[in-house]
Image (spheres, rainbow, N blue to C red):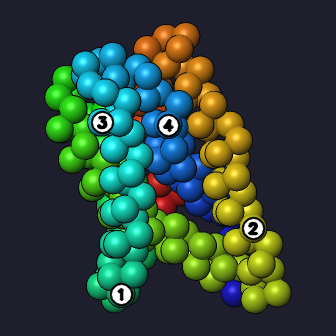
Amino acid sequence: MKKVSPLLILTLAIGVFGIITTEMGIVGVLPQITQKFDISTAQAGFLVSIFALVVAISGPFLILLVSSINRKIILLIAIFVFVISNIIYAYTTQFEIMLIFRILPAALHPLFFSIALVTAAKLVPPEKSGQAVTKVFMGITVGFALGVPLTSYLADQFSLEVAFLFGRLLTPLHSLEY
């Protein structure tokens, strides 16, 4: 078996961290979103709900649909969509546009997670697959513990745009190893 760089597992974990930060970081910036778009809290909260709904619906179908496509291509497409979405979140002046760009990455979220975890397991000998998957899964935990509050902090201290661009900076780091 070819020796795998530990950086590859780390980049998968960073990718998962970036996606969790994009997905859930929005919760902490809903007050700024209501102000920016002059909408109600309920309307802003729909950004969270629509993401979760699309993940739940698209996950099983898209995973089966793309199972024959090279996993690196799927990971890179997912990263690209998350990066573009974060840039659009930062600069759009229309709530509807932001909503659309919450739907697109949400559809790719289950693909990225499932492929990242399977890839981590396949990159190492079978006896180390549990450790590799755990390391990638840590990106989820760290995303919730650090990424989400950091997004809120950046929005409070700087701007909503800076908070969304933070999510954009995290996600491309994953693709460097590919």
First in residue order: circle 1 vs circle 4: 4
Please, is residue 106 above or below residue 168 in the view? below
Say which amino acid is labelled 3: Gln
First in residue order: circle 3 vs circle 4: 4
Circle 2 is placed at which residue position?
134
Q: Is residue 100 left or right of residue 151?
A: left
Q: Which numbered tag is attached to residue 27?
A: 4
* Residue lying at 59% horizontally and 49% vertically, measured from the top left: 17
Instruction: Describe the element under mark 4 as helix, strand or loop.
Output: helix
Give 8 or 170, whichever is nearer the viewer: 170
Question: CA gap, disc 2 to disc 4?
Answer: 26 Å
First in residue order: circle 3 vs circle 2: 3
Mark 1 near mark 4, Cβ–Cβ under 8 Å?
Answer: no
Give 2 or 81, whichever is nearer the viewer: 81
Please, is residue 101 above or below residue 7 in the view? above
Residue 69 percent across, percent down from the top left? 33, 82
* Residue lying at 75% horizontally and 85% vertically, measured from the top left: 125
Residue 8 percent across, percent down from the top left? 62, 62
* Residue lying at 49% horizontally and 11% vertically, measured from the top left: 158
Circle 1 is placed at which residue position?
64
Mark 3 near mark 4, Cβ–Cβ under 8 Å?
Answer: no
* Residue lying at 74% horizontally and 80% vertically, measured from the top left: 129
Question: CA gap, disc 1 to disc 2?
Answer: 24 Å
| Quarter of the rendering containing residue 39 | top left
Q: Is residue 49 left or right of residue 8?
A: left
Say which amino acid is labelled 2: Thr
